[in-house]
Image (spheres, rainbow, N blue to C red):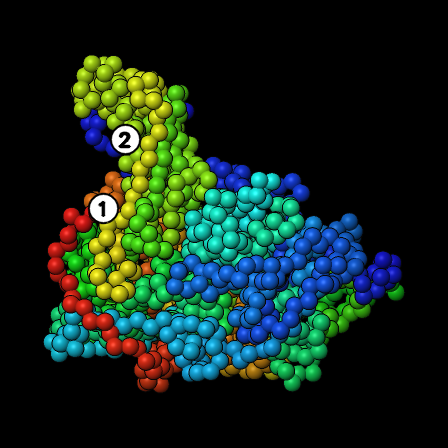
Amino acid sequence: MSLLQEHGPDAMVVAGGTDLFPNMKRRQFEPRVLVGLRGVRELGGIRGSAREGMTLGALATLTQVSLHPEILTHYPALARAADLVSTPQLRNMGTIGGNVCLDTRCNYYNQSYAWRKAIGFCMKKDGDICLVAPGSPRCVAVSSSDTAPVLWSLGARVRLVGPDGERVIPLPALYRDDGIQYLAKAPEEIVAEIALPPVDGLRATYWKLRRRGSFDFPVLGVAVALRREGEVCREARIVLGAVASQPREAVEAERLLAGERLTPELIDRVAEVAARPSKPLDNTDLVYYYRKRMTRVYVARALRELAGLPVGDWPTAMAGRNHANDEEAR
Amino acid sequence: MGPVETPPRRAEELAVIGKRLPKVDAWGKVIGETKYADDLILPRMAHARLLRARHPHARIKAIDTSRARALPGVLAVITGADFPPVKFGILPVSQDEEALSTEKVRYVGDAVAAVAAVDEETAERATELIEVEYEPLPPIMSIEEALAEGTVRIQEYGDGPNIHKLVSLEFGDVEEGFREADLIREDLFYFEGSNHLPMEQHAAVARWDPDGKLTLWSSTQTPHYVHRTLAKVLELPMSHVRVIATPVGGGFGGKSDPFSHELVVARLAQLTGRPVKCTLTREEVFYAHRGRHPVLMWVKTGVTRDGTIQAMHFRSILDGGAYGSYGVASTFYTGALQTVTYKVPRYKFEGCRVFTNKPPCGPKRGHGTPQPRYAIEVHLDKIAEALGLDPAEMRRRQVVEPFSKTANHLTITTCGLEECIDRVVEASGWREKHRRLPPGRGVGFAASSYITGAGLAIYWNEMPHTGVIVKIDRGGGVAAFCGSIDIGQGSDSVLASVVAEVLGILPEDIRVVTADTDLTPVDLGSYSSRVTLMMGNAAKEAAEKLRGLLLDAAAKKLEVSPAGLVARGRRVYLRDDPERGMSFAEAAQLAEAAYGTLAAAGSYRPPRRGGKFKGAGVGPTPAYSYTACVAEVAVDPETGEVRPLEIWIAHDGGRALNPLLVEGQVEGSVYMGLGEALMEEQIFRKGLHKIPSMLEYKSPTTLETPEIRTILVETNDPEGPFGAKEAGQVPLLPLIPAIANAVYDAVGVRVDEIPITPEKVLKGLDQKGKGQEPRVGPERFPRVSFPEPIRVESAFGQPADLSLKRE
């Protein structure tokens, strides 16, 4: 803490390093001091149960999260999201805290220094305009975390530790819709742990759009969590990833579900409304209007999955090979 | 030493050839011991980085290197002024490249200056301190812009302001053919460019010896051409330049040109008196490029009611990027091989290559032919549908005649394509599946052919294309020397296998010494699928000379006729009495005693069988290889995603010298073809490569690769060593159109543009839903002032004249 305070903006924390080191190599990040978190034992471990709620230490690796028996059984959407991040090697190093704090991405920004210089630096690093939307007053880099939309949908809370003590905030309060200042926390505060509330009948799923079954960041993530009484939805959360600089909750669509039965007709209507807040831009893989259109398809498929309706023959490559790891773990 | 087989009774059977043997260099690669160029560390070695242009098109007004020179750790900073004013390029007709640009930069990534420093990071920092004053020029970024622009020129030569090459050839009267046709169809296609994406980035190390001689180690497919270029650009005698090609971690055509960084490390090593290394970053590999040309294509074919082709007219426009590279050859290749797969009695080809402000395109696996193959195989699929014919059967009926000539005077030797078609049709259940699978599922068919080595060298000469020296020592050890470079295709293994087969020993008994211009005879390089056939023939010749000496010496000792002896299983013995004989080593000692040091050379030059017209140099080869393919896909109607489910592919590569290696080439081709068919795109935005990284340039992983059912159809070609043809390129070609045709079978959408991305499929489905033509692809073919064609009589159907072999 004192190191972070002493060096201020010159310092960054490093856990798995899978986001930080590539960014340092391309000079998106130029810290003078790196504070390693690996040695802080209190930040590790996965504790608790589905009945009482669980606590994920920020240093828990994505592999640990994806294979944890209690998570696999009771929070399978989170296990799935963690399992769909990048590659096995990076999941072994990358942490849940790091994925929650993942730098926003943009294909004008995630480039070498020479490339960025050639095209003209953008406001996220070394420049002052947005190359995606030149009129934009703010950076529109994309929130690219797989786990954040799921944690949001599950009602997770985040414990932040800083020089002035600690505070616990709902996960949505961690984010801001700004590609540069995408985290609403002080730079010297660190994410210490993530708390999941008791499951209490909440069922969730996660669908990920990407080109390949490995490596790729999401260019659309759909997390849906439902709590039902019999056939009727009592509570619904639909959170979209990779469509803005922070995860975006489709509140209007959620309202349509409240007190209703999950019929195919309702699902179609909900999916249509849920896609409205999805405003992808031309700064990731796959064309933006396609990603917009897929929002509707993926929300519908996620809802159908939770409703026990057929989702087509399509646990597709793009949706990820969702259950491979689950089976392995069992 | 491994196990030695008991000599079988029939000694004529081959002992090594045709066996499934691991590669001779496999173990080093598996355990990570293979030393690639970037693994080389020499004492006092310095590291180089290149400063690359940040404008797609600009005049260089001034370069100030003073700040870079002042940076501690910097050993030398050079610009184009530090080289003689000599341009180079792989083809003699396109000498348009400079080691470092002096007057102009022509694409973002063009090399402008270079730094040698104590480490890579210092060198990198120093490049950023070099100040280049540019006068930006209007960039030309597409085929349309290149054709339209009349004043701004990228290069100062060519067949038009920004036209590098125009070609027009007609064989027979195509109009007559169209008059005889019952159906004439025209189609437009576009094929986006792609990079080779080798796992190993390009790297080179140069060392200048105290005697004034230069050694360059480089990851290159063409050490001989790099040798020539170094001598030319550095103005050195070739005898003072040694090029050693290090094991190549993937080339696919991308390491077949001489490159800026190779010349730069040579000059920097000279100036600093230290060895200098330069390894390109992945981003720089996308700039070095020489990848697949984007090609816009128009094809018109006239057929009779039964689908028989009467005439074909094909036009292509290639987006060449900023330099010539192999482009003239690429242009011809988009037209030359149309006639080699199916019977095309009359054929007209018009080709055009334009310059654009993008990294230069060049040869990528299939060099200039995957694009037209895609166009024609989809075009024929449409014709078959229009005529109500089975597309596989329609093609099978008009496979070229073995040992015949094509309209454009190419000579076909063996052709196993009919059997390839039969085998994939059978194995895939084609007849039960085509037009019969449920919605969203489909199968597609396509076939292809390719050359087994270009008939001509890059530069005009009368010398052999390859040479092999074999030497036998007193312990029976055998060394084989050849300038060939193993780029993963297994040429070292082929060399060892051929020599082992002839001498009756095993591949593991042989030390192969390759790709060193000081030690090995010239081989032109690992391109155009030439090595197995050409080097194999040379190796066979050299080894046979030595076997003759061994058998003679052994025959004297055994007091029998040499004709009654065989060399096999590390022994020389009587064919009719295998117990009577001696060890290979003993025979070698007797032969050395009798004839002196045991060394022999073999060499090979392909037959000159092409036509006599201008442009006849591209297309001829000793033998053509063939492949047929059926692909089965699933298409998600809501997302447009195409998922390959299974690939059946039958390949005629002549006799498979090592089926394991041939299957590896087939599977690798399928994998690479899938990437091109479905996702790979070298695309640009605001004058820059949009996605120059392995993360964002999408290429498939093993997870996207379906089951591949490889079938080897073995013809025994008279031109190849032990009957072998090629395997490295032709299997890629049919895969791409087979996927496109399968997508159509699955959802009724024609994507006439590669890659077939999900949004294109969805667009086609939307059009279908609205009752419009379900087709996505180019809408128009720009006007190009093609010259009057060179008219040549069609040689279609004439018998092959093999007497012209080895003139």
Q: Do the residues marked 2 and 1 share a common chain?
A: yes
Which label number is shown at residue A201?
A: none
Pick whichever of labels 2 and 1 is earlier in the sequence.
2
**Chain letter behind tag 1:** B
Percent x, y for residue B644?
38, 61
Amino acid under disc 1: Arg
Residue at 57%, 58% in the rendered image: B83
Q: Residues within 10 Å of mark 2 (few under 14, many from 20)?
A: some
Residue at 42%, 32% in the rendered image: B511
Percent x, y for residue B254?
45, 57
Which residue in the structure is indicated by mark 2?
B545
Q: Secondary structure at mark 1?
A: loop
Which residue in the structure is indicated by mark 1?
B806
Q: Secondary structure at mark 2?
A: helix
Amino acid under disc 2: Lys
Percent x, y for residue A24?
69, 60
- Examine the image and state in which quarter residue A28 appears: bottom right
Q: Residues within 10 Å of mark 1 (few under 14, many from 20)?
A: few
Residue at 61%, 68% in the rendered image: A115
The quarter of the rendered structure image containing the N terminus of chain B is top left
